Image (spheres, grey):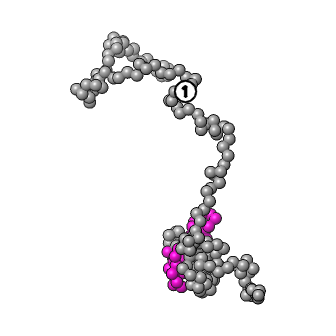
Amino acid sequence: MATRTLPPGLPAKVASVPPNQTLYVTNLPSAKIQKDDLRTALYMLFSTYGAVLDVVALKTMKMRGQAHIVYKDIQTATQAMRSLNGFEFFGRELKISYAKSKSNIIAKLDGTFKPPAASTAAQVEITDLQQSIFNAPVPGAPSAGVPAKPANADQVMKDAASPDTRGVKRPREEEGQEESDSDVAMEEDSDDE
């Protein structure tokens, strides 16, 4: 069995990734162009070499300036990588290599797709304080320490039952007419001294 020798000039990290349909593109402009425009431009550029299944270009801090281009087969991905590596794209030279793992689209086509595992948030242990808060009684619900409300505490409005009084403005109840007549005039300010 012959050992595989690396072509001269390739870093060991790049050469250790096996060829696949997904290309990893770096050194993309991140601030000059919108995400949708970047995806469209990458699709137009890379589709000249073969059928592009997907272009993943995110603008998050972790993925800024990077993209993944998914081809239908390895041969077209290899041809595009060889032709476009170092190509000037919006003023920057593209750096292209094979992606480390298989794309989700390729895994779905192969039938080997496994959905990502549940997040670690579901496995977090709940403390006693959190448990007491979650098990607290609902506000307004009867609880063991508070006496129950008497049955006749709620009263129905007198006017609500008759349809004649609906929408009619009720006059204010006059409590004491004589109180409003006995208003005292305000004193003048003594600041004018």
Q: In this view, does 163 lie to the left or right of 72?
A: left
* Residue 72: percent from left, percent from top: 54, 79
* Magenta stretch contains residue 83: no
Within the image, what quadrant is residue 46 found in? bottom right
Amino acid identity at mark 1: Ser
Q: Mark 1 points at which residue?
A: 143
Viewer-closest of 73 and 45: 73
Within the image, what quadrant is residue 164 found in? top left
* Magenta stretch contains residue 60: yes
Viewer-closest of 139 and 94: 139
Q: Quadrant of the N terminus?
A: bottom right
> Is any part of residue 179 visible from this angle?
yes
Above or below for 63 versus 51: above
Q: What element carries label 1?
A: loop
Viewer-closest of 44 and 151: 151
Please give the name of the residue rendered at 33% of the width and 11% of the height, measured from the top-left corner: 178
Q: In this view, does 67 lie to the left or right of 191?
A: right
Q: Residues within 10 Å of mark 1 (few under 14, many from 20)?
A: few
Q: Which stretch did the figure color magenta?
A: 40-65
Above or below for 170 versus 86: above
* Residue 93: percent from left, percent from top: 62, 80
* Residue 104: percent from left, percent from top: 57, 70
In the displayed orientation, state which residue is furthest to the left.
164
Please give the name of the residue rendered at 31% of the width and 21% of the height, measured from the top-left corner: 158
